[in-house]
Image: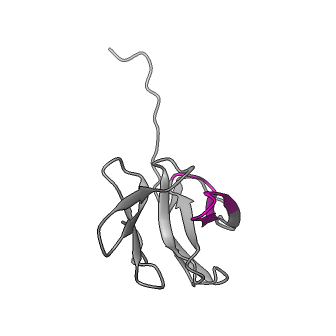
């Protein structure tokens, strides 16, 4: 898990990745799990929203990175926040997102990998 905020605000549930690499809701008291609706394996948890009814999630390989607010009851997700670098360089990937419980304040980190490509022709 990339998030330290897996436990619900009321302490009754946890959101973890299941054996199929999908986010699932686990009831802490008995361990029963429920896969989250309408999400494929590309989604990761950022944190629970402070209301306990929503999650903030993102797709790690999406550029620019988009954080969605996901409703646990309906399975609907709405675009909440789009993260991109000001100078928009190539070769970068967002690697971590931190949000406050209301989703209004955030920080993120990124990694940039640069390389050179050489074309060699007529080698003997």
Asked if one can make out residue 110 in the rendered structure from this viewpoint, the answer is no
Residue 58 x, y percent position in the rendering: 55, 61
Give the mark count.
0
Question: Does the stretch in magenta take in 73?
Answer: yes
- In this rendering, the answer to whether 20 lies above or below 16 is above
- In this rendering, the answer to whether 96 lies above or below 9 is above
Q: Would you say 120 lies left or right of 83 here?
A: left
Residue toward you, 111 or 57: 57
Q: How is the image coloured?
A: one colour
Most extreme residue toward the front is 30
Question: Does the stretch in magenta take in 119?
Answer: no
Q: Quadrant of the N terminus?
A: bottom left
Q: Would you say 124 lies left or right of 71 here?
A: left
Q: Residue at x 44, y 20 (%)?
A: 121
Residue 7 x, y percent position in the rendering: 41, 78
Q: Residue at x 45, y 55 (%)?
A: 113
Q: Residue at x 57, y 78 (%)?
A: 49
The stretch in magenta equals 61-78
Q: Would you say 74 lies left or right of 114 here?
A: right
Residue 63 x, y percent position in the rendering: 61, 54
Residue 96 x, y percent position in the rendering: 47, 69
Instruction: Tell me where residue 79 sits by quadrant.
Output: bottom right
- In this rendering, the answer to whether 118 lies above or below 59 is above
Q: Quadrant of the C terminus?
A: top left
Asked if one can make out residue 54 in the rendered structure from this viewpoint, the answer is yes
């Amino acid at each position: 898990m990339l998030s330290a905020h897996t436990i619900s605000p009321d302490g009754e549930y946890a959101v973890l990745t299941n054996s199929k690499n999908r986010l699932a809701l686990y009831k802490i008291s008995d361990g029963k799990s429920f896969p989250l609706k309408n999400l494929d394996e590309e989604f990761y948890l950022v944190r629970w929203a402070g209301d306990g009814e929503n999650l903030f999630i993102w797709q790690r390989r999406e550029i620019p990175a988009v954080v969605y607010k996901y409703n646990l009851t309906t399975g609907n997700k709405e675009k909440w926040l789009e993260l991109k670098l000001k100078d928009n360089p190539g070769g970068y990937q967002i690697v971590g997102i931190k949000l406050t419980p209301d989703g209004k304040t955030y920080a993120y980190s990124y990694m940039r990998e640069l390389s050179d490509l050489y074309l060699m022709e007529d080698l003997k």
